[in-house]
Amino acid sequence: MRELGALRRDASALDDAGYRHLPGLVTGHALVKLQQAFVDALSPNTGDPSWVVLQQRLLADPRVLGVGDAIRASVTDWVGPVVAHCGDICRVAQPGHVTRPHQDAAYSRREDALTVWVAVVDVPLHSGPLIVWPASHRLGLLDHGPGESGVTDARLTDSDWHGGALTAGDAIAFRALTVHASLPNNGSTPRLSVDYRYWPA
Ligand SMILES: O=C(O)CCC(=O)C(=O)O
């Protein structure tokens, strides 16, 4: 695996590589409030929430919505006007979790969408950061297996993945056709993140 970092930070990366690495995209009060929203939603006082309940709590939370709205301004600079909150997901990836390689367009059917995945906590390699297959958006929509089994394309085994440890507030923006996955969370704590999704306006 090669580092995301220095390679793909420039604005043209979304077209060339299908992703853009955005260290420190969310900082200061906005980051603290986003983290607190997760703490509140996961508080033992409110019970162990199911996936649906967690999404209902967090996706209606102004601290989560506010970050997505702020990122929309940047996304508009990169790709033109977009609509925010088009299928956002707040993730609590428990120890043992791994996300199989997939393209979001296989599920959303929106090849023109853009995702901005934000680390809510520090994500060292052993906690399962997001990784991307660079330039895979140029391959078109690939075959996906049933359920969440992901991409079945044989080229996957030879692909050169980009990824690395992330700090809270770091983000990766990627196109809906860019194949992405996560490393396994081999840590002892949940890996928290939000994927904000944007569609052309
Ligand atoms: O956070 C993950 O493990 C997966 C994220 C993802 O698939 C996405 O943002 O589309």
Image (spheres, grey):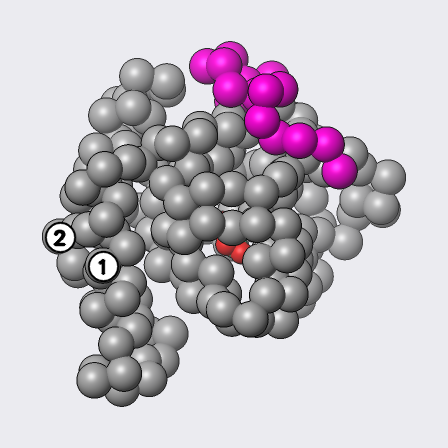
Residue plotted at (79% across, 44% down) = 156
Residue 2 visible in the shown view: yes
Would you name the residue on which mark 1 appears? 36
Residue 126, placed above or below residue 110: below
Q: Viewer-proximal residue, 120 or 101?
A: 120
- 148 left or right, relative to 32: right
| Residue 11 belongs to magenta span | yes
Q: Position of residue 34 (x, y in %)?
A: 25, 51
Would you name the residue on which mark 2 appears? 62
- Neighbour tally class for label 1: few under 14, some 14-19, many 20 plus, Cα within 10 Å: some
Which mark's residue is nearer the viewer, 1 or 2?
Answer: 1
Q: CA distance from mark 1 to mark 2?
A: 11 Å
Residue plotted at (21% across, 83% down) = 46
- Screen quadrant of the C terminus: top left
Q: Viewer-proximal residue, 165 or 66?
A: 165
- Screen quadrant of the N terminus: top right
Residue 76, placed above or below residue 43: above
What's the magenta region? 1-16
**Count of number-bearing discs:** 2
Q: Position of residue 5 (x, y in %)?
A: 58, 26
Residue 114 visible in the shown view: no
| Residue 13 belongs to magenta span | yes
Q: Position of residue 161 (x, y in %)?
A: 72, 37
